[in-house]
Image: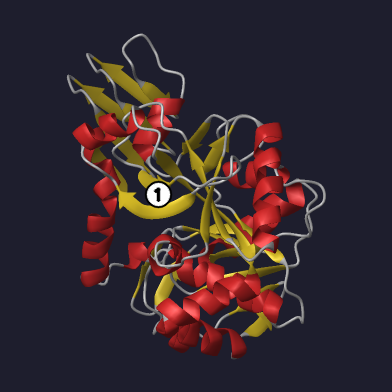
Amino acid sequence: MINNDSTLFQDTVLRLPKDVGKPLVICNEEHRFLVAEQLREIGVNTCGIILEPNGKNTAPAVTLAALNFSNSNEDPVLLVLSADHLIQNNTAFHRAIEIGKTLAEQEKLVTFGIKPTTPETGYGYIEIKKSKSKKYHNIKSFIEKPSLDKAKSYIHSSNYYWNSGIFMFKASVYLKELDKFEPEILKACNKSFNNSYEDLDFLRLNKEEFNKCPEKSIDYAVMENTSNGAVVKLDTQWKDLGSWSTLWDYKAKDSNGNVTEGDVILEAVNDTYAVSSNRLIAALGVSGLVIIDTPDAMLISDKKYVRNIKNIVEKLRKNNRSELDNHRQVFRPWGYYDSIDSGNGFQVK
């Protein structure tokens, strides 16, 4: 939780304009009961929760949402939101959404950009081609995680925005462009969706078909290739809190620049983020670290490298480590259980 009342996911749902339809949630199957419980806590009903067997980046997830609505004989404007964004001004957000909706109804594929205020090397950027309209610009290119020198130059240029990862378009328009540029994604998602089945309040995809889907972001699969793209400025404070280092940036720090959560003791430590979910963490004479202890595993990283955690994830995958897919704490409709130990033919809960 970023504040004491709600999670980032709950904040994202509660931020929606009042005139939008019920949200559709796409999440990993391991998070299904956690998602359902958080929605129940804030009293929000969805039009569905689709479970991905594994993550395939944003293009397949958005494709599933578009297929879900196209199969219901509707062609709504889709607003695509991530669950790990911090947006400070909901009025400005709603104002940008209204502009985006108008453009999407004109069959534009809209993304939202934020004018950079600091040289963030961990964010993606959008290079724009200025249009005659004061409400939007055209897309020239997407830049993924630039060097520090380039990021500094983008601050002083009017042609670059942070890529918020928020999108708007008609379901049919997105699927048409996807079929043009990445037909294999559409093919795999279509087969997986058409062979899905209901499980309680969830929709489970066909795992075998979904595993065939290429892994690609919507930025590179569609937005950078389409000639119908548009960038709308999102004029508010915004942060992508998708990494431990950005969380450290945002959170209140002690006099030595440290952020601690849980049972943590520090001595001669600076600029460090230490989180303990159970055991005591004691650190001495270190600086600029991220130390995260959970029941599943412990992460220790220099803050500058923590965004490369995907390299560790890839090593876990290559070594067939169970930690990649299974958590000690497993949520169920009645609550959760803690898997204390397991082996060949047994499990202790």
Left or right, 192 with reference to 98: left
Tell me the SS state at disc 1: loop
Left or right, 246 with reference to 332: left
Q: Quadrant of residue 102?
A: bottom right
Position of 136 relative to 320 (above/below)? above
The spot of residue 66 in percent (x, y) is: 62, 73
State the residue at coordinates (48%, 74%): 53
Front-most of 59 and 128?
128
Which residue matches tag 1? 295
- Considering every residue shown, the one lying at the far left of the view is 285
Q: Quadrant of residue 121?
A: top left
- Considering every residue shown, the one lying at the far front of the view is 132
How crowded is the residue under tag 1: few (<14 C-alpha within 10 Å), some, or many (20+)?
some
State the residue at coordinates (41%, 32%): 116
State the residue at coordinates (33%, 16%): 257
The spot of residue 330 in percent (x, y) is: 53, 61
The spot of residue 274 in percent (x, y) is: 35, 30
Residue 29 seen by the camera: no
Which amino acid type is shown beneath numbered disc 1? Pro
The spot of residue 16 in percent (x, y) is: 72, 47
